[in-house]
Amino acid sequence: MKAIPKETLRIIDANLNRIGEGLRVLEEFARLSLNDTNLTQQLKDMRHGTLDIDLQLQEQLINARDSEGDVGADMQAAGEEKQRDVKEAVIANARRVQESLRVMEETAKAPDISLESDKYKQARFALYTIEKDLLSRILRQDKLKRLTGLYVIIDTAFLEGRSPAEIAAQVIRGGAKVIQLRDKEHSAGEFLSIAAVLKKLCSEHDVLFIVNDSLEVSLAVDADGLHVGQGDLPVATARRLLPIDKILGASARTVEEARTARSEGADYLGVGSIYATATKATAKVVGPGRTKEMRQAVDLPIVAIGGINKSNLREVLKAGADSAAVISAVMGAADIEEATKQLVNVIEEENIE
């Protein structure tokens, strides 16, 4: 068997090192940032599989290594020196691994090299999918971090001739962090038209936009997420049909319902009715104490809902809610923007304390 040229060994060594380093970075993001067992395992298996070479070749690679003489050691590509957020780091490391896998795929075709070219090709294509899933989950995590503060539900049943877009504009000016659109009154086409306008408005002001119940409308307007109740589309089905970067909320009255929603893929819980509410007279009141129970049982963000207003909002927050959803406290006010501001002020004061 002919000896493998030193320059070829150096190419193999450098690219295997890049593959291992890049996959380790991606694996750590999946494991420690996302706590995602499936993605972590996929990346770990890929790392071990692509770096699995026989001991004799490994010794040759190490002997051929010349880090001090590598002309590329001090080279830096444009933009490499800038700071990166998690998304940029994932993209950069995925590209690095994909490029090195391509190099290995071609190098492995050379005579007298005991490596399987197809193994690196398969890993490269698998990583394209993993990169997409990893980025999507990170984007979903970013949305969940914004699920704080005041969560305003614009219910078309309480419009009383007012424009939903104008109401949304007022609550946004008042400081709401999240807007959910609930529409049981209109046709699917009218619901879609209203949602499209509100989605555009929310995007322009960096406010999360959630659609209640309707998966079709949520998908059509590219909403940030969907919220489903106990009698709506099952959580598991909604999670399967939603794009992976969209957040999914689920209503829960009991700890058992919360645990089921968590296991089926819900990203956050809508817990209530915390107090009696005129917007849903048949709703069972669970009290703010239920929020504490949910907090202890399930590791998901909690949005408290039902009868919340300025007088009891502080109690809801002290019980452990990450966000408070309101309808009549805002839509029933003579000055919607001012009512929103007052609720937001209570939340900000509670956060400071």
Image (cartoon, grey):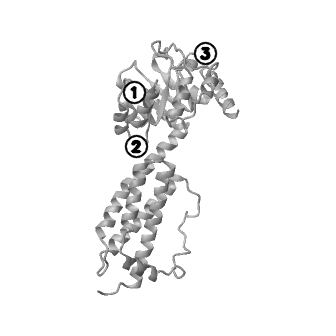
> Which residue sits at x=31%, y=87%?
2
Quadrant of the image for the C terminus?
Answer: top right
Amino acid under disc 2: Ile
The label shown at residue 213 is: 1
Q: Which residue is mark 2?
A: 244
Q: Secondary structure at mark 2?
A: loop
Q: Is residue 64 above or below residue 20?
A: below
Mark 2 surroundings: few (<14), some (14-19) or many (≥20) residues within 10 A? some
Q: Is residue 295 visible?
A: yes
Work out whether mark 3 precedes mark 2 in sequence or the reverse, and give the earlier one.
2
Residue found farthest to the right: 353
Work out whether mark 3 precedes mark 1 in sequence or the reverse, and give the earlier one.
1
Q: Secondary structure at mark 1?
A: loop
Q: Quadrant of residue 173?
A: top right
> Which residue sits at x=60%, y=19%?
309
The label shown at residue 334 is: 3
| In the displayed structure image, the side of residue 13 where residue 152 appears, left or right | right
Residue 51: percent from left, percent from top: 39, 68
| Residue mark closest to the camera, 3 vs 2 | 2
Work out whether mark 1 precedes mark 2 in sequence or the reverse, and give the earlier one.
1
> Which residue sits at x=46%, y=63%?
22
| In the displayed structure image, the side of residue 112 where residue 132 appears, left or right | right
